[in-house]
Every structure is written in structure tokens, then in C-alpha cells.
Image (tube, rainbow, N blue to C red):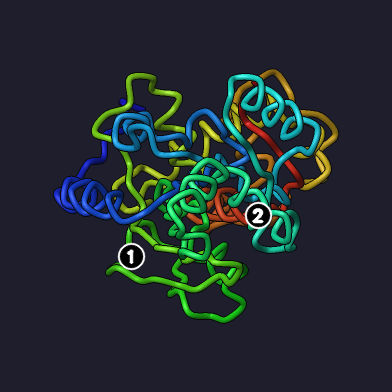
């Protein structure tokens, strides 16, 4: 599988919109995927953010290995980044997120008080790559289904503000990838989690790469999910065929329905049905 590159024209426009929106906010809440904490961080964001305070938020914590998430969180904190761990699906960490935002804004709050603007509304922007769960997190924080939630990358559009209470307002932004991935593994991991649209990928080849990765990072979870008596010798195609036969994903003549099996593997990984799996160690 060749290097994955995806930077359509609307991503360049998204970057311009984000730069103008950054002028409106006091805090950047950077949402990343706890299953791929390194790959889901946008390396352009540091330059875009300048000296604005940032809160790094590991989302989808319910789908990631909790021990790995704790190690990642500690690593980020040690490097000077204030960090939160949340799951929009289960509600984990949501109650702590507003206090964490105010902690990240403490210098700004102090400066406002010194200027006689103690009650001034503070504005927060949630940023992240496509399909990282921003709209679901906003729905949790706002408490109503105000944000449009889509499971396709890159469809949340327009500037929307949401009141969080406690003197905070939230700005939603579209997901933004970066122009090129220097490390091909980064592109693959983003594709595994759905940050890159499937319709520009060879999903059968992608599912084989996913199996190769899971055989290393989560062999026990694979065996349990697909009732296998072992991973085998590392041949992803042989593993793919065993799983397809276990699931009865066959075509006439007893062959494998490769497209259905590929979609099933990607959907089950993305939906957390294989268990709590982290694909990158700190």
C-alpha cells in the first residue's frame, strides 16, 4: 500500500477559517484519539496556536487500553501539556473537563480580574482531525444535541457557538488534517480509525494492514473476537481468510467475500467491538 496522502482543497480553506477563528478564542482544546495519541495530533497546530493556552484532551478513552492512556497522559503532562481524558460515549471525564478548561485559563482569568473584567465570558475552541469525535463531545458538554454529529470525516460545517455555563463559550470547528504524512504509519493509523475517507482507499488492503497491526498490538483481542485458536505465523492474508470463514463471509464456490470481510474488520475495530485497543505506545 503506497503512502496515504489526503489534502483536498477544503482542508486548505479549513486552515484559513481556523486561523481567523483562533483570534476569537482564549483557549484551544485539542482533541486527539486515545487509540492513536501520536498520529492524531496535528503538527501544524502548535504554529497556528501561537502562545494561546492549550488543553490536550484524549478522547474515545472507552475504546483505548486504559493502562496505555494513563501512560500517554503522564507523558504529555511531563512535557508541560495540561491533559484530560474523556469519553463522549460513556461520559468518562466530562464533568472534569470544564474545571480543567478554567485551570488552563487561570492566567487569563487573573488578568481579566486585574482589569476589572472578572465576569468576562471566556471562549474555547475544540480542534482536532476529522472523525475524532468533536461533535459528540460538544453534545455531551452542551447537554443537548445541538452539534451536528456525522460519522463521515469532514462534514461538520459553519461557525457554531455553544454556551457551556460557568462563564465559558465553545466554538466548534471542522476537522483538519495536515498536508502530508512524513511517516507512512501515521497515514495508516489515521485510516484505521476513519479519519481519512474510505472511498479514497483500498479497504481490502487497509484491512490486511489493520490485521498485521492488531496481530502485534492486540493478538488476544483478535483471537477472542473471532474465536481463533492463535494468530498464526504473521501472514495477514491467511488470518483474513480464517476470520472470513469463521464469520461465513463467503461467495459462490466457497471463496472469500473480501469486500464484506474488509468492511466488517474496519467497522468492528472502529466501533470498539474488538475491545479496548491502543495502537501506539508512548
Q: Secondary structure at mark 1?
A: loop
Vertical position of residue 45 compared to residue 172: above or below: above
229 shown above or below 102: above
Indicate the quadrant containing the C terminus: top left, top right, bottom left or bottom right: top right
Quadrant where the N terminus sits is top left
Q: Upstream in the sequence, badge 2 or badge 1? A: 2
Label 2: which residue?
Answer: 97
According to the picture, the residue beneath numbered tag 1 turns out to be: 155
**Distance in Å between CA atoms under marks 2 and 1:** 25 Å
- What kind of element bears circle 2? helix
Residue nearest the observer in this picture, 276 or 103: 103
Observer-side mark, 2 or 1, equals 2
Answer few, some or many: residues within 10 Å of disc 1's Cα (few below 14, many 20 plus, some between 14 and 19): some
**Rendering coords of residue 2 (x, y %):** 31, 26
Which residue is nearer to you in this view: 160 or 196? 160
In the image, is 42 to the left or to the right of 84? left
Q: Which of the 4 quarters of the picture holds residue 232?
A: top right
Is residue 166 or residue 256 the one in the foreground? 166
The image shows residue 29 at horizontal and vertical percentages of: 49, 48
Amino acid at each position: 500500500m503506497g503512502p496515504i496522502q489526503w489534502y483536498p482543497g477544503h482542508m486548505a480553506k479549513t486552515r484559513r477559517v481556523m486561523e481567523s477563528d483562533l483570534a476569537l478564542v482564549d483557549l484551544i482544546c485539542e482533541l486527539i484519539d486515545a487509540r492513536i495519541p501520536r498520529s492524531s495530533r496535528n503538527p501544524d497546530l502548535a504554529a497556528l496556536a501561537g502562545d494561546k493556552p492549550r488543553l490536550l484532551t484524549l478522547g474515545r478513552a472507552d475504546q483505548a487500553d486504559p493502562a496505555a492512556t494513563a501512560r500517554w497522559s503522564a507523558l504529555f503532562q511531563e512535557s508541560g501539556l495540561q491533559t484530560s481524558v474523556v469519553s463522549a460515549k460513556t461520559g468518562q471525564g466530562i464533568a472534569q473537563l470544564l474545571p480543567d478548561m478554567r485551570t488552563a485559563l487561570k492566567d487569563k482569568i487573573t488578568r481579566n480580574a486585574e482589569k476589572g473584567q472578572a465576569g468576562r465570558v471566556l471562549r474555547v475552541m475544540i480542534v482536532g482531525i476529522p472523525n475524532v469525535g468533536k461533535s459528540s463531545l460538544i453534545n455531551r458538554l452542551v447537554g443537548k444535541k445541538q452539534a451536528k454529529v456525522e460519522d463521515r470525516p469532514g462534514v461538520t460545517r459553519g461557525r457554531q457557538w455553544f454556551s457551556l455555563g460557568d462563564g465559558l463559550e465553545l466554538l466548534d470547528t471542522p476537522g483538519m488534517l495536515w498536508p502530508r504524512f512524513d511517516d507512512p504509519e501515521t497515514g495508516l493509523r489515521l485510516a484505521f480509525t476513519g479519519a481519512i475517507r474510505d472511498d479514497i482507499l483500498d479497504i481490502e488492503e487497509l484491512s490486511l494492514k489493520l490485521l498485521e497491526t492488531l496481530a502485534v498490538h492486540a493478538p488476544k483481542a483478535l483471537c477472542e473476537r473471532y474465536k481463533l485458536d492463535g494468530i498464526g505465523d504473521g501472514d495477514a492474508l491467511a488470518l483474513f481468510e480464517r476470520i472470513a470463514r469463521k464469520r461465513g463471509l463467503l461467495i459462490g464456490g466457497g471463496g472469500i467475500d473480501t469486500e464484506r470481510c474488509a468492511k466488517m474488520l474496519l467497522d468492528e475495530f472502529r466501533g470498539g467491538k474488538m475491545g479496548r485497543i491502543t495502537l501506539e505506545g508512548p
